[in-house]
Amino acid sequence: MADYTLEQKESFTVFGLGTELKSHYTDYAGINKEKSDFWQAVGQDGRLDTLKGMAANDFVFAVSEAVNNKMMFYAGVMTEASVPAVEGSRVIQFPKGEYLVVKGEGKTAEELSNQLAAIAFGQALPEAKNFAYVGGPNTAVVMGQRNDSVFGEMWIPVVKK
C-alpha cells in the first residue's frame, strides 16, 4: 500500500521553462531520459539558477502537463511576481483544491522525482478509491536536502469520485 495523504491546497503559480517530451507516454525509459537531458541542460546553461533567482521560496518544481495535445515537462519555481516571457516558458496555474500528496527522499532530485511519480501514478492513485486525477498539471517538488539526500513531494490535483 502506498503512503499518501490528501491535502487541501490554495491555488499557486509556477513559472517554468519547458520542453516537449516526444517519447510515447508508456515509454518510461524514454521519458525519463528526456527529462534527465532537459534537467542537465537547464542546470549547465544557467537557466535553473535564473529561475531560482525569481522564486518566492526554495522549492524547485518538475511539472508535467498536457498542453495542446503535447506532453510538456517544465523546470520551475513558485513565483508571485510577474516574470518576463522567455521562449519555452509558461506560467502554470495550479487550482485551489484537493491534492494527492506523496512524500519521499532520493539521492538526487531526478531520482526523487522519478520515484515519487512511480509511487503516485503506479500505486497511490489506483488505491485512492474515492478520488480521481482528471488531468491538469502535476508536479514533483524538491523541498530541500538533508544528509546526502534530497526530499520532497509529488502533488497531483484530484477530485472526489
Image (spheres, rainbow, N blue to C red):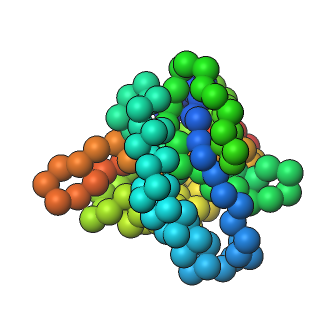
Residue at 30 percent across and 51 percent down: it is: 151
Q: Position of residue 127 (x, y in %)?
A: 56, 59
Q: Residue at x 46, y 55 (%)?
A: 45
In this rendering, position of residue 146 left or right of residue 79: left
User: What residue is drawn where x is 54% and y is 20%?
Assistant: 80
Q: Is residue 72 left or right of residue 52?
A: right
For residue 150, say whether it is visible. Answer: yes
Q: State the residue in front, 43 or 151.
A: 43
Residue name at image x 57 percent, y 80 percent: 29
Residue reaching furthest to the top: 81
Q: Quadrant of residue 110?
A: bottom left
Q: How many marks?
A: 0
Vertical position of residue 17 compared to residue 31: above or below: above
Coordinates of residue 161 in the picture (x, y in percent): 73, 43
Q: Quadrant of the N terminus?
A: bottom left
Q: Is 91 left or right of 10, judged from the image as shown?
A: right
As rendered, which of 64 and 22 lies closer to the eye?
22
Q: Residue furthest right?
A: 68
**Quadrant of residue 100 within the rendered picture:** top right
The spot of residue 19 in percent (x, y) is 66, 58
- From the top left corner, tell me how far across and down residue 116 is, in percent: 45, 59
Residue at the far front in the pictured view = 45
Answer yes or no: is residue 155 visible.
no
